[in-house]
Amino acid sequence: MLPKATRTGVPAAPSRNALRVLRNLALAGSAVGSFCVAAALTYDVNRRIRVAERIVENKRTIQTSAPQYDATAATRRLARMMEAAEAGEFMGIDSLKEDEFRPRKKKTPVVGSQEKPHAEDANADASTKGWGSSCQPGSSLNPGRLKSFPSFLNAVKTEGSLGRTTSSAPSEPMRTQELLSRSKIGIGQSHRSDSGASTGSADATPQNNAPSLAQQIEGLLDQDRPIEAAQLFLDTYSGNIKGVSSEMHELVLRTFYLNCKQENVFIARNVFLRLDEINEGSLLMWEMLLFALAKRGCIESVATLFIQYKHKFRVRPVLLDVLIRCLVEARRLSEAKSLLFGNLQHDRDCGLCGAFLAGLWRKTRSIELLNGQLRKLLNVLPRSGRIPSDKLFNPVLKAYVEFGKLADAEALVNLMMTKYKLPLRCRTKGLLVYGKSLNGDWEGVKQGLEEMCDSTTIIVKPRDFLQIFDRIFLEYWVSHTGPEIHDFIFYYIDKFRLVPDRVLYKHILEAFVEKGDEKMIAKLSAMSRNDRGSSNSTTSSSWIYYVPGA
Protein backbone atom coordinates (compact mmCIF):
# COMPACT_ATOMS: atom_id res chain seq x y z
CA MET A 1 0.00 0.00 0.00
CA LEU A 2 1.02 3.57 -0.57
CA PRO A 3 1.73 5.93 2.31
CA LYS A 4 -0.81 8.57 3.12
CA ALA A 5 -0.74 11.61 0.86
CA THR A 6 0.08 15.06 2.10
CA ARG A 7 -2.64 17.50 3.10
CA THR A 8 -2.18 19.65 0.03
CA GLY A 9 -2.09 16.79 -2.53
CA VAL A 10 -4.78 14.44 -3.81
CA PRO A 11 -4.54 10.88 -2.41
CA ALA A 12 -3.32 8.37 -4.97
CA ALA A 13 -5.70 5.57 -3.83
CA PRO A 14 -8.25 4.75 -1.09
CA SER A 15 -6.95 4.02 2.39
CA ARG A 16 -6.69 0.56 3.96
CA ASN A 17 -9.91 1.03 5.92
CA ALA A 18 -11.74 1.92 2.71
CA LEU A 19 -10.38 -1.22 1.04
CA ARG A 20 -11.51 -3.34 4.02
CA VAL A 21 -15.01 -1.89 3.75
CA LEU A 22 -15.06 -2.71 0.03
CA ARG A 23 -14.13 -6.32 0.75
CA ASN A 24 -16.82 -6.67 3.40
CA LEU A 25 -19.44 -5.25 1.08
CA ALA A 26 -18.26 -7.54 -1.70
CA LEU A 27 -18.89 -10.54 0.53
CA ALA A 28 -22.39 -9.26 1.35
CA GLY A 29 -23.63 -9.95 -2.19
CA SER A 30 -26.29 -8.01 -4.17
CA ALA A 31 -25.57 -5.29 -6.72
CA VAL A 32 -23.53 -3.25 -4.26
CA GLY A 33 -21.42 -6.29 -3.55
CA SER A 34 -20.70 -6.93 -7.21
CA PHE A 35 -19.69 -3.34 -7.67
CA CYS A 36 -17.34 -3.56 -4.70
CA VAL A 37 -15.86 -6.78 -6.09
CA ALA A 38 -14.98 -4.99 -9.32
CA ALA A 39 -13.54 -2.08 -7.34
CA ALA A 40 -11.39 -4.38 -5.22
CA LEU A 41 -10.10 -6.25 -8.27
CA THR A 42 -9.15 -3.09 -10.13
CA TYR A 43 -7.71 -1.37 -7.07
CA ASP A 44 -4.17 -2.68 -7.48
CA VAL A 45 -4.08 -1.86 -11.21
CA ASN A 46 -5.35 1.65 -10.63
CA ARG A 47 -2.83 2.14 -7.85
CA ARG A 48 0.08 1.11 -10.05
CA ILE A 49 -1.11 3.33 -12.91
CA ARG A 50 -1.51 6.28 -10.55
CA VAL A 51 2.00 5.77 -9.15
CA ALA A 52 3.47 5.60 -12.67
CA GLU A 53 1.63 8.76 -13.67
CA ARG A 54 2.89 10.51 -10.55
CA ILE A 55 6.48 9.48 -11.33
CA VAL A 56 6.22 10.73 -14.92
CA GLU A 57 4.65 13.98 -13.75
CA ASN A 58 7.39 14.58 -11.17
CA LYS A 59 10.09 13.82 -13.75
CA ARG A 60 8.61 16.31 -16.21
CA THR A 61 8.31 18.93 -13.48
CA ILE A 62 11.96 18.48 -12.50
CA GLN A 63 13.11 18.65 -16.14
CA THR A 64 11.10 21.83 -16.70
CA SER A 65 12.26 23.64 -13.56
CA ALA A 66 15.86 22.34 -13.59
CA PRO A 67 16.98 21.38 -17.11
CA GLN A 68 20.58 20.75 -15.97
CA TYR A 69 19.56 18.30 -13.23
CA ASP A 70 20.82 14.75 -13.83
CA ALA A 71 19.13 12.11 -11.70
CA THR A 72 21.58 9.42 -12.84
CA ALA A 73 24.59 11.42 -11.64
CA ALA A 74 22.88 12.03 -8.30
CA THR A 75 22.25 8.29 -7.93
CA ARG A 76 25.89 7.47 -8.65
CA ARG A 77 27.02 10.07 -6.13
CA LEU A 78 24.73 8.53 -3.50
CA ALA A 79 26.11 5.05 -4.24
CA ARG A 80 29.70 6.27 -3.82
CA MET A 81 28.70 7.96 -0.59
CA MET A 82 27.29 4.70 0.78
CA GLU A 83 30.41 2.75 -0.27
CA ALA A 84 32.69 5.32 1.39
CA ALA A 85 30.58 5.25 4.55
CA GLU A 86 30.71 1.46 4.76
CA ALA A 87 34.50 1.52 4.27
CA GLY A 88 34.90 4.25 6.88
CA GLU A 89 36.44 6.66 4.38
CA PHE A 90 33.60 9.15 4.05
CA MET A 91 35.02 12.69 4.44
CA GLY A 92 31.92 14.73 3.54
CA ILE A 93 30.08 15.88 0.41
CA ASP A 94 32.93 18.18 -0.64
CA SER A 95 35.33 15.29 -0.99
CA LEU A 96 32.91 13.53 -3.35
CA LYS A 97 32.58 16.65 -5.46
CA GLU A 98 36.37 16.96 -5.67
CA ASP A 99 36.65 13.33 -6.78
CA GLU A 100 34.21 13.97 -9.62
CA PHE A 101 36.44 16.67 -11.10
CA ARG A 102 39.71 14.81 -10.37
CA PRO A 103 40.68 12.12 -12.94
CA ARG A 104 40.65 8.68 -11.40
CA LYS A 105 44.10 7.02 -11.35
CA LYS A 106 45.11 3.41 -11.14
CA LYS A 107 47.42 2.42 -8.34
CA THR A 108 50.76 1.01 -9.53
CA PRO A 109 53.42 -0.83 -7.61
CA VAL A 110 56.76 0.60 -6.64
CA VAL A 111 59.34 0.77 -9.41
CA GLY A 112 61.10 -2.57 -9.56
CA SER A 113 58.34 -4.50 -7.82
CA GLN A 114 56.95 -7.65 -9.44
CA GLU A 115 53.34 -7.02 -8.28
CA LYS A 116 50.84 -6.56 -11.10
CA PRO A 117 48.61 -3.52 -11.04
CA HIS A 118 44.89 -3.95 -10.50
CA ALA A 119 42.70 -3.51 -13.58
CA GLU A 120 39.92 -1.60 -11.84
CA ASP A 121 39.90 1.63 -13.82
CA ALA A 122 39.03 1.33 -17.50
CA ASN A 123 39.74 5.00 -18.18
CA ALA A 124 43.41 4.56 -17.25
CA ASP A 125 43.81 1.66 -19.69
CA ALA A 126 42.06 3.59 -22.38
CA SER A 127 44.36 6.58 -21.87
CA THR A 128 47.42 4.29 -22.05
CA LYS A 129 46.21 2.73 -25.25
CA GLY A 130 45.47 6.15 -26.62
CA TRP A 131 49.02 7.24 -25.91
CA GLY A 132 50.45 4.20 -27.62
CA SER A 133 48.30 4.63 -30.70
CA SER A 134 49.20 8.28 -30.93
CA CYS A 135 52.89 7.41 -31.09
CA GLN A 136 52.51 5.39 -34.25
CA PRO A 137 54.10 6.69 -37.45
CA GLY A 138 51.94 9.06 -39.35
CA SER A 139 50.15 10.36 -36.28
CA SER A 140 49.55 14.06 -35.73
CA LEU A 141 51.46 14.22 -32.45
CA ASN A 142 54.02 16.96 -32.09
CA PRO A 143 57.61 15.56 -32.38
CA GLY A 144 58.71 17.85 -29.58
CA ARG A 145 56.40 16.05 -27.22
CA LEU A 146 57.80 12.66 -28.30
CA LYS A 147 61.34 13.82 -27.53
CA SER A 148 60.34 15.11 -24.11
CA PHE A 149 58.73 11.81 -23.12
CA PRO A 150 61.97 9.75 -22.41
CA SER A 151 63.56 12.59 -20.48
CA PHE A 152 60.41 12.82 -18.41
CA LEU A 153 60.57 9.10 -17.54
CA ASN A 154 64.25 9.36 -16.58
CA ALA A 155 63.50 12.30 -14.33
CA VAL A 156 60.74 10.33 -12.63
CA LYS A 157 63.05 7.37 -12.00
CA THR A 158 65.93 9.45 -10.64
CA GLU A 159 63.70 11.44 -8.29
CA GLY A 160 62.15 8.24 -6.97
CA SER A 161 58.56 9.24 -7.46
CA LEU A 162 56.49 6.36 -6.16
CA GLY A 163 52.97 7.60 -6.85
CA ARG A 164 53.27 7.96 -10.64
CA THR A 165 51.05 5.88 -12.90
CA THR A 166 51.94 4.45 -16.25
CA SER A 167 48.88 5.99 -17.82
CA SER A 168 49.41 9.49 -16.42
CA ALA A 169 53.11 9.67 -17.29
CA PRO A 170 52.65 10.53 -20.97
CA SER A 171 50.01 13.17 -20.15
CA GLU A 172 52.35 15.34 -18.08
CA PRO A 173 54.61 16.59 -20.94
CA MET A 174 51.54 17.10 -23.09
CA ARG A 175 49.90 19.12 -20.34
CA THR A 176 53.10 21.10 -19.84
CA GLN A 177 53.35 21.93 -23.52
CA GLU A 178 49.67 22.92 -23.60
CA LEU A 179 50.10 25.18 -20.59
CA LEU A 180 53.11 26.83 -22.20
CA SER A 181 51.25 27.38 -25.45
CA ARG A 182 48.22 28.78 -23.60
CA SER A 183 50.41 31.13 -21.62
CA LYS A 184 52.01 32.39 -24.82
CA ILE A 185 48.58 32.96 -26.34
CA GLY A 186 47.39 34.76 -23.21
CA ILE A 187 50.48 36.99 -23.19
CA GLY A 188 49.92 37.83 -26.85
CA GLN A 189 46.25 38.65 -26.27
CA SER A 190 47.00 40.81 -23.26
CA HIS A 191 49.64 42.61 -25.29
CA ARG A 192 47.18 43.26 -28.08
CA SER A 193 44.50 44.45 -25.64
CA ASP A 194 46.98 46.86 -24.05
CA SER A 195 47.96 48.24 -27.42
CA GLY A 196 44.28 48.52 -28.40
CA ALA A 197 43.46 50.39 -25.21
CA SER A 198 46.32 52.79 -25.80
CA THR A 199 45.24 53.58 -29.34
CA GLY A 200 41.53 53.59 -28.43
CA SER A 201 40.40 52.00 -31.69
CA ALA A 202 38.48 48.85 -32.55
CA ASP A 203 40.95 48.13 -35.34
CA ALA A 204 43.57 47.02 -32.75
CA THR A 205 42.25 43.47 -33.05
CA PRO A 206 44.03 41.17 -35.51
CA GLN A 207 43.16 41.78 -39.11
CA ASN A 208 42.17 38.18 -39.69
CA ASN A 209 39.51 38.35 -36.93
CA ALA A 210 37.70 41.51 -38.09
CA PRO A 211 36.40 39.98 -41.35
CA SER A 212 35.18 36.91 -39.44
CA LEU A 213 33.05 39.09 -37.18
CA ALA A 214 31.68 41.03 -40.13
CA GLN A 215 30.93 37.80 -41.95
CA GLN A 216 29.10 36.43 -38.92
CA ILE A 217 26.92 39.53 -38.64
CA GLU A 218 26.25 39.59 -42.37
CA GLY A 219 25.35 35.90 -42.32
CA LEU A 220 22.87 36.45 -39.49
CA LEU A 221 21.29 39.34 -41.36
CA ASP A 222 20.99 37.25 -44.52
CA GLN A 223 19.20 34.61 -42.44
CA ASP A 224 16.77 37.28 -41.17
CA ARG A 225 18.10 37.09 -37.61
CA PRO A 226 18.69 40.74 -36.70
CA ILE A 227 18.40 40.16 -32.95
CA GLU A 228 21.32 37.71 -32.91
CA ALA A 229 23.34 40.05 -35.14
CA ALA A 230 22.73 42.97 -32.79
CA GLN A 231 23.64 40.90 -29.75
CA LEU A 232 26.87 39.78 -31.42
CA PHE A 233 27.81 43.40 -32.01
CA LEU A 234 26.94 44.37 -28.42
CA ASP A 235 29.02 41.51 -27.00
CA THR A 236 32.04 42.31 -29.18
CA TYR A 237 32.23 46.10 -29.00
CA SER A 238 32.33 47.63 -25.56
CA GLY A 239 31.81 51.26 -24.70
CA ASN A 240 35.52 52.05 -24.29
CA ILE A 241 36.21 51.37 -27.98
CA LYS A 242 36.25 54.55 -30.01
CA GLY A 243 35.28 54.14 -33.63
CA VAL A 244 34.52 51.20 -35.89
CA SER A 245 35.48 50.35 -39.43
CA SER A 246 33.32 51.51 -42.32
CA GLU A 247 32.30 47.95 -43.18
CA MET A 248 31.25 47.21 -39.62
CA HIS A 249 29.41 50.53 -39.39
CA GLU A 250 27.32 49.69 -42.45
CA LEU A 251 26.46 46.28 -41.04
CA VAL A 252 25.46 47.77 -37.69
CA LEU A 253 23.26 50.36 -39.43
CA ARG A 254 21.60 47.58 -41.39
CA THR A 255 21.08 45.63 -38.18
CA PHE A 256 19.59 48.68 -36.46
CA TYR A 257 17.12 49.52 -39.22
CA LEU A 258 16.06 45.90 -39.62
CA ASN A 259 15.31 45.64 -35.90
CA CYS A 260 13.29 48.85 -36.07
CA LYS A 261 11.36 47.50 -39.05
CA GLN A 262 10.55 44.26 -37.23
CA GLU A 263 9.60 46.25 -34.09
CA ASN A 264 12.46 44.89 -31.98
CA VAL A 265 12.63 48.35 -30.48
CA PHE A 266 14.55 47.63 -27.30
CA ILE A 267 17.39 45.73 -28.97
CA ALA A 268 17.52 48.58 -31.51
CA ARG A 269 17.74 51.04 -28.63
CA ASN A 270 20.68 49.12 -27.15
CA VAL A 271 22.46 49.20 -30.52
CA PHE A 272 21.91 52.96 -30.79
CA LEU A 273 23.18 53.58 -27.27
CA ARG A 274 26.29 51.48 -27.90
CA LEU A 275 26.98 53.31 -31.17
CA ASP A 276 26.59 56.59 -29.36
CA GLU A 277 29.14 55.48 -26.78
CA ILE A 278 31.69 54.91 -29.55
CA ASN A 279 30.78 58.26 -31.19
CA GLU A 280 28.89 56.76 -34.12
CA GLY A 281 25.29 57.81 -33.34
CA SER A 282 23.41 59.95 -35.85
CA LEU A 283 20.31 62.14 -35.97
CA LEU A 284 18.59 59.85 -38.45
CA MET A 285 19.01 56.82 -36.18
CA TRP A 286 17.68 58.80 -33.22
CA GLU A 287 14.58 59.88 -35.15
CA MET A 288 13.97 56.38 -36.47
CA LEU A 289 14.23 54.94 -32.97
CA LEU A 290 11.81 57.52 -31.57
CA PHE A 291 9.26 56.71 -34.27
CA ALA A 292 9.62 52.95 -33.69
CA LEU A 293 9.21 53.31 -29.92
CA ALA A 294 6.16 55.55 -30.34
CA LYS A 295 4.61 53.11 -32.80
CA ARG A 296 4.94 50.30 -30.26
CA GLY A 297 3.38 52.50 -27.58
CA CYS A 298 6.56 52.79 -25.48
CA ILE A 299 5.68 56.30 -24.33
CA GLU A 300 8.01 56.38 -21.34
CA SER A 301 10.96 55.19 -23.43
CA VAL A 302 10.30 57.90 -26.02
CA ALA A 303 10.25 60.57 -23.33
CA THR A 304 13.41 59.27 -21.68
CA LEU A 305 15.32 59.01 -24.96
CA PHE A 306 14.29 62.52 -26.00
CA ILE A 307 15.33 64.08 -22.70
CA GLN A 308 18.66 62.23 -22.83
CA TYR A 309 19.60 63.56 -26.30
CA LYS A 310 17.68 66.82 -26.58
CA HIS A 311 20.88 68.86 -26.23
CA LYS A 312 22.83 66.73 -28.71
CA PHE A 313 20.30 66.51 -31.56
CA ARG A 314 17.98 69.22 -32.78
CA VAL A 315 14.40 68.07 -33.26
CA ARG A 316 13.07 68.40 -36.77
CA PRO A 317 9.46 69.57 -37.35
CA VAL A 318 8.31 66.13 -38.47
CA LEU A 319 8.89 64.79 -34.93
CA LEU A 320 7.23 67.58 -32.97
CA ASP A 321 3.69 66.20 -32.89
CA VAL A 322 4.81 62.71 -31.80
CA LEU A 323 7.17 64.02 -29.13
CA ILE A 324 4.69 66.49 -27.63
CA ARG A 325 1.99 63.84 -27.33
CA CYS A 326 4.41 61.31 -25.81
CA LEU A 327 5.83 63.81 -23.33
CA VAL A 328 2.36 64.80 -22.17
CA GLU A 329 1.26 61.17 -21.85
CA ALA A 330 4.41 60.45 -19.81
CA ARG A 331 3.62 63.48 -17.61
CA ARG A 332 6.73 65.34 -18.69
CA LEU A 333 4.63 68.50 -18.87
CA SER A 334 7.47 70.99 -18.46
CA GLU A 335 9.47 69.29 -21.22
CA ALA A 336 6.43 69.28 -23.51
CA LYS A 337 5.78 72.94 -22.81
CA SER A 338 9.36 74.01 -23.51
CA LEU A 339 9.40 71.96 -26.72
CA LEU A 340 6.12 73.52 -27.88
CA PHE A 341 7.01 77.13 -27.09
CA GLY A 342 10.43 76.69 -28.68
CA ASN A 343 8.94 75.46 -31.97
CA LEU A 344 5.78 77.53 -32.41
CA GLN A 345 7.10 78.77 -35.75
CA HIS A 346 6.69 75.22 -37.07
CA ASP A 347 3.11 74.81 -35.82
CA ARG A 348 0.71 74.67 -38.75
CA ASP A 349 -2.92 75.56 -38.04
CA CYS A 350 -2.27 75.33 -34.26
CA GLY A 351 -2.28 71.54 -34.33
CA LEU A 352 0.61 71.25 -31.87
CA CYS A 353 -1.04 73.70 -29.48
CA GLY A 354 -4.29 71.75 -29.60
CA ALA A 355 -2.51 68.45 -28.92
CA PHE A 356 -0.70 69.99 -25.94
CA LEU A 357 -3.86 71.50 -24.43
CA ALA A 358 -5.90 68.32 -24.95
CA GLY A 359 -3.25 66.20 -23.23
CA LEU A 360 -2.87 68.76 -20.46
CA TRP A 361 -6.58 68.57 -19.66
CA ARG A 362 -6.62 64.79 -19.84
CA LYS A 363 -3.71 64.45 -17.40
CA THR A 364 -4.39 67.28 -14.94
CA ARG A 365 -8.15 68.04 -15.07
CA SER A 366 -7.33 71.58 -14.02
CA ILE A 367 -9.36 74.37 -15.62
CA GLU A 368 -7.12 77.06 -14.12
CA LEU A 369 -3.97 75.51 -15.58
CA LEU A 370 -5.67 75.13 -18.96
CA ASN A 371 -6.82 78.75 -18.99
CA GLY A 372 -3.33 79.95 -18.08
CA GLN A 373 -1.69 78.02 -20.91
CA LEU A 374 -4.34 79.25 -23.38
CA ARG A 375 -3.64 82.88 -22.45
CA LYS A 376 0.12 82.35 -22.86
CA LEU A 377 -0.35 80.79 -26.29
CA LEU A 378 -2.65 83.60 -27.42
CA ASN A 379 0.05 86.11 -26.43
CA VAL A 380 2.99 84.22 -27.97
CA LEU A 381 1.43 83.06 -31.26
CA PRO A 382 1.32 86.53 -32.91
CA ARG A 383 5.05 86.98 -32.19
CA SER A 384 5.75 83.80 -34.14
CA GLY A 385 3.61 84.92 -37.05
CA ARG A 386 0.84 82.41 -36.35
CA ILE A 387 -2.90 83.04 -36.30
CA PRO A 388 -5.07 81.15 -33.78
CA SER A 389 -7.47 78.58 -35.22
CA ASP A 390 -10.35 76.47 -33.94
CA LYS A 391 -7.86 73.66 -33.13
CA LEU A 392 -6.48 75.89 -30.38
CA PHE A 393 -9.89 76.57 -28.79
CA ASN A 394 -11.62 73.20 -29.20
CA PRO A 395 -9.67 71.39 -26.41
CA VAL A 396 -10.49 74.21 -23.98
CA LEU A 397 -14.11 74.22 -25.17
CA LYS A 398 -14.34 70.48 -24.57
CA ALA A 399 -12.90 70.94 -21.07
CA TYR A 400 -15.55 73.57 -20.30
CA VAL A 401 -18.33 71.25 -21.50
CA GLU A 402 -17.08 68.24 -19.52
CA PHE A 403 -16.55 70.39 -16.44
CA GLY A 404 -20.13 71.70 -16.61
CA LYS A 405 -19.30 75.29 -17.57
CA LEU A 406 -21.60 75.60 -20.57
CA ALA A 407 -21.86 79.38 -20.20
CA ASP A 408 -18.07 79.75 -20.36
CA ALA A 409 -18.04 77.51 -23.42
CA GLU A 410 -20.58 79.72 -25.22
CA ALA A 411 -18.57 82.81 -24.25
CA LEU A 412 -15.40 81.25 -25.67
CA VAL A 413 -17.18 80.47 -28.95
CA ASN A 414 -18.39 84.06 -29.13
CA LEU A 415 -14.80 85.25 -28.56
CA MET A 416 -13.57 83.04 -31.39
CA MET A 417 -16.12 84.43 -33.84
CA THR A 418 -15.87 88.11 -32.88
CA LYS A 419 -12.25 88.79 -31.94
CA TYR A 420 -10.39 86.22 -34.01
CA LYS A 421 -12.91 86.07 -36.91
CA LEU A 422 -12.99 82.28 -36.94
CA PRO A 423 -15.88 80.52 -38.73
CA LEU A 424 -18.12 78.23 -36.73
CA ARG A 425 -17.26 74.67 -37.71
CA CYS A 426 -19.01 71.38 -37.12
CA ARG A 427 -16.85 70.25 -34.21
CA THR A 428 -17.17 73.53 -32.33
CA LYS A 429 -20.96 73.66 -32.72
CA GLY A 430 -21.20 69.97 -31.92
CA LEU A 431 -19.42 70.46 -28.60
CA LEU A 432 -22.02 73.05 -27.61
CA VAL A 433 -24.85 70.68 -28.57
CA TYR A 434 -23.17 67.90 -26.62
CA GLY A 435 -23.03 70.19 -23.59
CA LYS A 436 -26.80 70.65 -23.82
CA SER A 437 -27.26 66.88 -23.90
CA LEU A 438 -25.25 66.58 -20.69
CA ASN A 439 -27.66 69.05 -19.08
CA GLY A 440 -30.71 67.12 -20.37
CA ASP A 441 -31.86 69.90 -22.71
CA TRP A 442 -33.11 67.66 -25.51
CA GLU A 443 -35.08 70.42 -27.19
CA GLY A 444 -31.89 72.42 -27.43
CA VAL A 445 -30.12 69.33 -28.77
CA LYS A 446 -32.75 68.92 -31.49
CA GLN A 447 -32.50 72.57 -32.43
CA GLY A 448 -28.72 72.49 -32.49
CA LEU A 449 -28.57 69.40 -34.72
CA GLU A 450 -31.04 70.94 -37.16
CA GLU A 451 -28.95 74.12 -37.27
CA MET A 452 -25.83 72.10 -38.04
CA CYS A 453 -27.44 70.39 -41.04
CA ASP A 454 -29.64 73.21 -42.38
CA SER A 455 -27.39 76.22 -41.85
CA THR A 456 -25.16 77.38 -44.67
CA THR A 457 -22.75 79.19 -42.35
CA ILE A 458 -21.66 76.11 -40.40
CA ILE A 459 -18.98 74.06 -42.14
CA VAL A 460 -20.13 70.46 -41.68
CA LYS A 461 -17.82 67.47 -42.02
CA PRO A 462 -19.54 64.06 -42.09
CA ARG A 463 -16.97 62.41 -39.85
CA ASP A 464 -17.17 65.12 -37.18
CA PHE A 465 -20.97 65.09 -37.33
CA LEU A 466 -21.17 61.34 -36.78
CA GLN A 467 -18.79 61.52 -33.83
CA ILE A 468 -20.86 64.25 -32.17
CA PHE A 469 -24.12 62.43 -32.88
CA ASP A 470 -22.70 59.23 -31.39
CA ARG A 471 -21.74 61.02 -28.16
CA ILE A 472 -25.20 62.59 -27.96
CA PHE A 473 -26.89 59.24 -28.59
CA LEU A 474 -24.94 57.61 -25.75
CA GLU A 475 -26.37 60.23 -23.37
CA TYR A 476 -29.88 59.79 -24.79
CA TRP A 477 -29.73 55.99 -24.58
CA VAL A 478 -29.22 55.91 -20.80
CA SER A 479 -32.20 58.09 -19.83
CA HIS A 480 -34.89 56.96 -22.33
CA THR A 481 -36.96 53.88 -23.08
CA GLY A 482 -36.77 51.54 -26.06
CA PRO A 483 -39.56 53.15 -28.14
CA GLU A 484 -38.13 56.62 -27.49
CA ILE A 485 -34.70 55.45 -28.63
CA HIS A 486 -36.28 53.95 -31.75
CA ASP A 487 -38.08 57.21 -32.62
CA PHE A 488 -34.95 59.30 -31.91
CA ILE A 489 -32.72 57.22 -34.17
CA PHE A 490 -35.03 56.82 -37.13
CA TYR A 491 -36.12 60.45 -36.98
CA TYR A 492 -32.61 61.68 -37.67
CA ILE A 493 -31.88 58.86 -40.13
CA ASP A 494 -34.95 59.81 -42.18
CA LYS A 495 -34.59 63.57 -41.82
CA PHE A 496 -30.86 63.89 -42.48
CA ARG A 497 -30.51 60.74 -44.61
CA LEU A 498 -27.91 59.69 -42.09
CA VAL A 499 -26.04 56.43 -42.65
CA PRO A 500 -24.30 55.19 -39.47
CA ASP A 501 -20.70 54.16 -39.48
CA ARG A 502 -19.43 51.05 -37.70
CA VAL A 503 -19.23 52.62 -34.21
CA LEU A 504 -22.65 54.26 -34.32
CA TYR A 505 -24.28 51.14 -35.78
CA LYS A 506 -22.82 49.05 -32.96
CA HIS A 507 -24.15 51.44 -30.29
CA ILE A 508 -27.62 51.49 -31.89
CA LEU A 509 -27.70 47.70 -32.00
CA GLU A 510 -26.64 47.47 -28.34
CA ALA A 511 -29.38 49.93 -27.35
CA PHE A 512 -32.05 47.94 -29.22
CA VAL A 513 -30.86 44.68 -27.65
CA GLU A 514 -30.91 46.17 -24.15
CA LYS A 515 -34.11 48.24 -24.24
CA GLY A 516 -35.83 47.36 -27.52
CA ASP A 517 -37.42 44.28 -29.04
CA GLU A 518 -36.98 41.97 -32.00
CA LYS A 519 -38.92 44.23 -34.37
CA MET A 520 -36.48 47.10 -33.80
CA ILE A 521 -33.49 44.85 -34.45
CA ALA A 522 -35.12 43.43 -37.59
CA LYS A 523 -35.88 46.93 -38.86
CA LEU A 524 -32.31 48.04 -38.30
CA SER A 525 -30.97 44.97 -40.10
CA ALA A 526 -33.35 45.50 -43.02
CA MET A 527 -32.27 49.13 -43.27
CA SER A 528 -28.61 48.11 -43.40
CA ARG A 529 -29.31 45.56 -46.15
CA ASN A 530 -31.28 48.06 -48.20
CA ASP A 531 -28.63 50.76 -47.92
CA ARG A 532 -25.68 48.56 -48.75
CA GLY A 533 -27.31 45.85 -50.86
CA SER A 534 -25.82 43.15 -48.65
CA SER A 535 -26.04 41.95 -45.08
CA ASN A 536 -24.12 43.94 -42.50
CA SER A 537 -24.93 41.81 -39.49
CA THR A 538 -21.25 41.70 -38.51
CA THR A 539 -20.97 45.50 -38.34
CA SER A 540 -18.21 45.55 -40.90
CA SER A 541 -16.31 48.72 -41.74
CA SER A 542 -17.93 48.88 -45.19
CA TRP A 543 -20.66 51.16 -43.82
CA ILE A 544 -20.28 54.71 -45.09
CA TYR A 545 -21.81 57.97 -43.95
CA TYR A 546 -23.41 60.85 -45.81
CA VAL A 547 -24.78 64.16 -44.56
CA PRO A 548 -26.50 66.70 -46.84
CA GLY A 549 -24.58 69.92 -47.32
CA ALA A 550 -21.20 68.31 -46.78
Image (tube, rainbow, N blue to C red):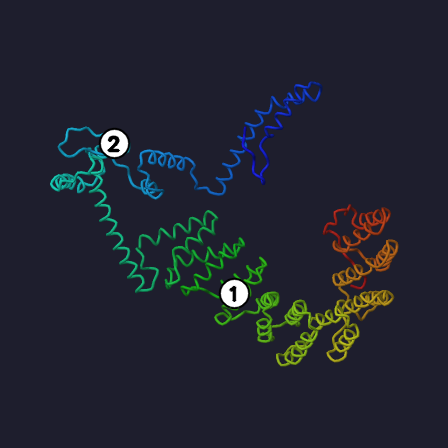
| Callout 1 secondary element | helix
The residue wearing badge 2 is 125
Residue 362 screen position, x and y as percent: 67, 67
Residue 468 screen position, x and y as percent: 77, 63
Q: Amino acid at mark 2?
A: Asp
Horizontal side of 112 relative to 473 (left or right) equals left
Q: Quadrant of the C terminus?
A: bottom right
| Residue 203: quadrant of the picture | bottom left
Distance between the alpha carbons at the discs numbered 2 and 1: 64 Å
| Residue 81: quadrant of the picture | top left
Identify the disc placed on residue 467.
Answer: none
Count neighbours of disc 2 (C-alpha within 10 A) and say few if under 14, some if 14 to 19, many if 20 or more: some
| Callout 2 secondary element | helix
Q: Residue furthest left?
A: 158
| Residue 90: quadrant of the picture | top left
Residue 355 screen position, x and y as percent: 65, 68
Q: Relative to 149, does residue 206 appear above or below in the rendering?
A: below
Mark 2 vs mark 1, foreground winner is 2
The residue wearing badge 1 is 305
Horizontal side of 449 relative to 120 (left or right) equals right
Residue 440 screen position, x and y as percent: 84, 65
Closer to us: 210 or 302: 302
Q: Amino acid at mark 1?
A: Leu
Earlier sequence position, callout 2 versus callout 1: 2
Count neighbours of disc 1 (C-alpha within 10 A) and say few if under 14, some if 14 to 19, many if 20 or more: some
Q: Relative to 399, does residue 235 appear above or below in the rendering?
A: above
Residue at image location 28% in from the left, 39% down from the top: 103
Horizontal side of 237 relative to 470 (left or right) equals left
